[in-house]
Image (cartoon, grey):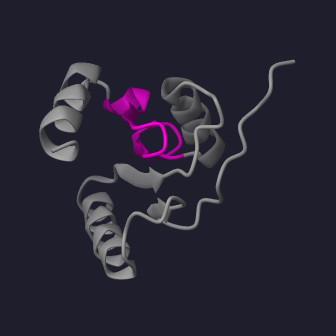
Amino acid sequence: MAAQPQFPALTGRVVDEAGLLSREEADALARQLEALEERTSDQLVVVTLRSLQGFPIEDYGYKLGRHWGIGQAGKDNGVLLIVAPTERKVRIEVGRGLEGELPDALAKLIIENAILP
């Protein structure tokens, strides 16, 4: 049996395990994500990680999204933004219910043009 990653606890819409955000930044971001969910019902969670524990970010992100159960049952409308500064990796993991609105190509553009700069 393959090793499984250890996941941080889902403590809210922003889980800053890597300590990249100030308390004020995390709170402001959480309020924006809450407003997005109220408008659209889509659930977006941001997580910064101390380590990917040797896993590819794609595998870690998929497993973390499933573990946390992001998105509403039957809609699979969750999005997980993963930032792993130690490995210098960023990924947007999109639930199947939102793949039409946020395909991988668009997620890549968002990372390259809005997050990384």
Residue furthest to the bottom in view is: 24
On the image, the x and y values in percent for residue 65 come to 54, 40
Residue 115 part of the magenta-drawn span: no
Which residue is drawn at the image coordinates 71% and 37% (left, top)? Answer: 5
Q: Which sits in the foreground, 64 or 34?
A: 64
Q: Quadrant of the C terminus?
A: top left
Residue 42, position in %: x, y?
Answer: 34, 49
Q: Report whether residue 101 is seen.
A: no
Q: Is residue 69 left or right of residue 104?
A: right
**Residue 12 drawn above or below residue 95:** below
Residue 24 percent coordinates (x, y) = 32, 81
Location of the N terminus by quadrant is top right
- Classify 112 as above or below 83: above
- Decide: is 46 above or below 102: below
Which one is nearer the viewer's eye here, 87 or 47? 87
In terms of image quadrants, where is residue 104?
top left
Q: Which portion, as a residue range, is magenta?
A: 70-98
Residue at position x 36%, y 77% from top?
27
Does residue 95 show up magenta in the picture?
A: yes
Q: Nearer the viewer, residue 34 or 57?
A: 57
